[in-house]
Image (spheres, coloured by chain):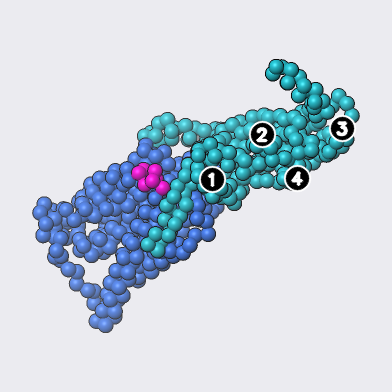
Chain colours: A cyan, B blue
Amino acid sequence: MIRILLALFLLASPAHASEKVIAGLSQNRVAITANFDGTGILIFGAVKREAPPPTTGPLDVIIAVSGPERPVVVRKKARVLGIWVNKESRTVSSAPSFYAIASTGPLPKILSKSEDLRYKITIPRMVAEKAAADGLSNIDEFASAVIRIRQHNGLYTEKGGKVNLADQTLFDTQIALPSALVEGDYKARVFLLRDGRVIDDFSKTIAVRKVGMERWIYNLAHERPLIYGLLSLAIAILAGWLASTIFRLLKLS
Amino acid sequence: MQSYLPIAEVSVSVFLLLGLGTTVGILSGMFGVGGGFILTPLLFMIGIPPGVAVGTQGNLIVASSFSGMLAHLRRKTVDFRMGLVLLAGGLVGSALGVRLFHLLTALGQVDLVIKLAYVLLLGIIGALMLVEALVALKRRNAKGGKVTKRKHHSWVHGWPIKMRFRTSKLYISAIPPFGIGVMVGILSAIMGVGGGFLMLPAMIYILGMPTKVVVGTSLFQITFMSAFTTVLHAIENQTVDMVLAFVLLIGGVIGAQIGTRIGEKIRADTLRILLAAMVLSIAIKLAFELVLMPSELFSIAY
C-alpha cells in the first residue's frame, strides 16, 4: 500500500524531480591561524536538467551556512531594588553559533511556510525549533533574544537577493565568515525552489579548525592545564623581567 | 592587524590591545595598583568573554607587577615579612575566590556581583582616600610643608600573634595583614584585579605602614598571589588566554616603566588625590550601568 502511494506521489511531481542542483565550495576547510580575520566562501553551482526548464513559476536558490550547534543560556534582566539583575533564565538546547542565509529573493516570497518547517531554513526556524523542543513556555521572547543578539553581533545574517542566478541555470554567492569564528563542522546547504517548494537540495561540510600555534595553545590549555598555567606565567614573568632590564640599561646609558 | 585569541575565540585588533595594555601599565607603575579594575571592564567592552577576561587578567597582572616589583626591590622599598604575611592570606583568599567565581558563573550572576563589588569597594575607598588626601594636603599647606604624624597604634595592632616588621618600623599582630590578604585574594580571583586599590589604603590606614614601602610591598604580594590565581583559573576554568595576555603585557610592561618614572616625580599627596578621583569616577560609571535600564534586557551565555 505504501509503495503504491509512494509511486503515485512520484508520478504526481515529474516536473520538479527533473531539476537537480549541483554545487561546489571555494574551500571546504577554514584554518584559524593567529592572524585570522574572517574569510569568505564562494558557493556556486548549476541546475542540472534532462528537459527544458518548466514554465511553472520562477526558479529560486537559497544558500545557508550554519555553524556548530551549542546550547545557549538566555537570561533576562529585571529591576530588583533599583538595579538591573539577571532574573529569569532559559536554556535553548541548541542554536547554531553562526548562520548566514543568502537567496535569490526575499525569503517570505520564495519560500513557503510548510517547506521552511520541513527543512528548517530561516533563522527563526533554526532557533525556535530547538526552543520548542525544549518545551519553553514563552519561546518567542527568549529565542528571539538569541536571534537579535547574534544578528547584532553579525553572527546571524539574512541577505535576500545576494545569490546571482543566471539563465535559470548558474548560480553563485559569497558567504562571509566573521573573525569571531567558533571551531567545528559548518554545514553549507543549497536549496533549489520552484513556487516556494524545495525541489532539490545539496549539503556539504566545511571544517573550521584552529591550526598551528592556535591549535597547540588550545590543546595544551584543555589537556594539560597545569603546565599551560605555569607556561603562561613563565612567559609573563620573562617578558616583565626583560622589559624592566631593558629599561634599566637604557636609563644607565 | 587582527589577532585571533585561541581561548577567547574572538579576533581583536593587536593595536587596540597594545594601547589598552600600555595605558593600564602606566597607571600600574604610577600608583602601584595592578590596573585590573580598569582593564577588566574594558576587556568586557571589546567583546572578550567575562570569564576569559578575569582569568587572563591574573597573568597580565603578574607581568606588570613583576617589573614594577623589581624596580622597588632595587630601591629597597619592599617589606618582605609584611609581604609574606599578606601573601599567605592572599593564597587562601584566591583559592576561595576561584571556587566562588565558578559557582557564580553557573548561577549567571557573576557580572552583577563583579559590578556591585566594584561600585561598593571603589566608591567607599575612593571617597575615603579623597577626603583623607585633601585633609592632609590642606594641613600641610597650612603648616608650611610639615608632614602629618603617622598614627602608631590603631585598634587592630593589639591583637595576638605579634610580629616585628622592621622595614615598616611596626610591631603589630599578624592577623590584620593576613585578613587583608584573604580579602584581596578573593577579589583577585572573582574580579580579575590585583587588589592594590584595596590593599594600599588598608596598608596605610589600617596597618599604619609608611607610604614609602606600601607600593613595593603590595606589588610583591600581588605578583605572587596573581601567579597563583592564574594557575588556579587555568586548571579550574580553562580561561587563561596566553595570546591575549602576551599582547596586553607587552604594552603593560612598557607602560609600567613609564608610570614608575612619573610616580617618582609626583608628590605622594597629589598621587593619592589622582588615584582617588580615578577610583571614584569608575565607581560612578558602574553604578549608572546598574541603575539605568539596559538597552538589551537579555544576555546569552554558553
Q: Position of residue A196 (x, y in %)?
A: 76, 38
The residue where tag 3 is placed is A54
Helix, strand or loop at disc 3?
A: loop
In space, the residues marked 4 and 3 are separated at their CA atoms by 19 Å
- Which of these two is toward me, A100 or B122? A100
User: Mark 4 or 1 closer to N-term?
Assistant: 4
Mark 1 neighbour density, 10 Å: few (under 14) some (14–19) many (20 or more)? some
Label 3 crowding class (10 Å Cα cut-off): few <14, some 14-19, many 20+? few
Residue of label 2: A119
Which residue type carries mark 2?
A: Tyr
Q: Are marks 4 and 3 in contact (CB under 8 Å)?
A: no
Q: Amino acid at mark 1?
A: Ile
Q: Earlier in the sequence, mark 2 or mark 3?
A: 3
Q: Is residue A137 inside the magenta stretch? A: no
> Where's residue B119, x and y in %?
37, 62
Residue A139 circle label: 1
Q: Amino acid at mark 3?
A: Pro
Residue in the foreground of this view, choosing between A58 and B158: A58
The earlier-in-sequence mark between 3 and 1 is 3
First in sequence, mark 4 or 3: give its number: 3
The chain that hosts pointer 1 is A
Q: Earlier in the sequence, mark 2 or mark 1?
A: 2
For the point 29% across and 49% down, the residue is B185
User: Tag 2's secondary structure?
Assistant: helix
Tag shown at residue A109 = 4
Which tag, 2 or 4, sits closer to the chain's start? 4
Residue B39 drawn above or below residue B230? below
